[in-house]
Amino acid sequence: MAIRDILVVPDPVLKQVSTPVEVVDDALRALMDDMLETMYAAPGIGLAAIQIGVPKQVIVMDLARPEEPPQPQYFVNPEILWASEDTAPYEEGCLSVPDIYDEVERPARVKLKYLNYQGQEVVEDAEGLYAVCIQHEMDHLKGVLFIDYLSRLKRDRAVAKVKKQVRAA
């Protein structure tokens, strides 16, 4: 396993649309292991492959609280089958937009389908933080960042702040 560099705005790679994965094999599992290690090191709760420069429909997440043992989740070719009409606001952040947080409104519940670490199909419901995080990460697969939901002014300020942080580092 290896820790990879996480791309930050305004890197144009983050706006790419990711392609579906043909097969879940050892090479893809190695990528997912690297993604998980990278996410933990950042630290974060979710990471899409495009955030490390790999335009594949792959996501890793771990929503365990600090006092709980790790609970890694792997999503290959995820798709939302259904989303509730009722929405819920949630303050989001992103490893590709460091130190920026703002409220985004998303469907409160979703039903999703994906392939897991072994390549088996899973269909399940998500709500609360799980629903927010999976929708946030799936947006990455379409080249969408959470700041794209904000006003142009807030988005421009966020990008400018990240650029300044990168220059200072």
Image: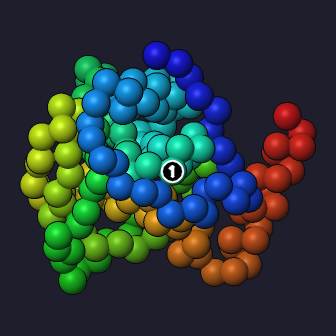
Image-based side of 26 in relation to 83, left or right: right
Image-based side of 148 in relation to 72, left or right: right
Residue 11 position (above or below residue 76): below
Q: Which amino acid is tagged 1?
A: Pro
Asked whether residue 102 is in view, the answer is no
- Identify the residue at image location x=82%, y=43%: 166
- Identify the residue at image location x=82%, y=53%: 163
> Which is more toward the observer, 154 or 15?
15
Residue 147 position (above or below residue 68): below
Question: Dot 1 surroundings within 10 Å: few (below 14), some, or many (20 or more)?
Answer: many
> Which is more toward the observer, 51 or 104?
51
Image-based side of 152 in relation to 141, left or right: right
* Image quadrant where residue 9 sits: bottom right
Q: Position of residue 12 (x, y in %)?
A: 70, 59
Q: Position of residue 26 (x, y in %)?
A: 31, 24
Q: Position of residue 60 (x, y in %)?
A: 36, 39
Write down the residue under mark 1.
55
On-image quarter of the C terminus = top right
Which residue extends farthest right?
A: 168
- Identify the residue at image location x=18%, y=60%: 112
- Identify the residue at image location x=28%, y=73%: 107
Q: Position of residue 44 (x, y in %)?
A: 48, 37
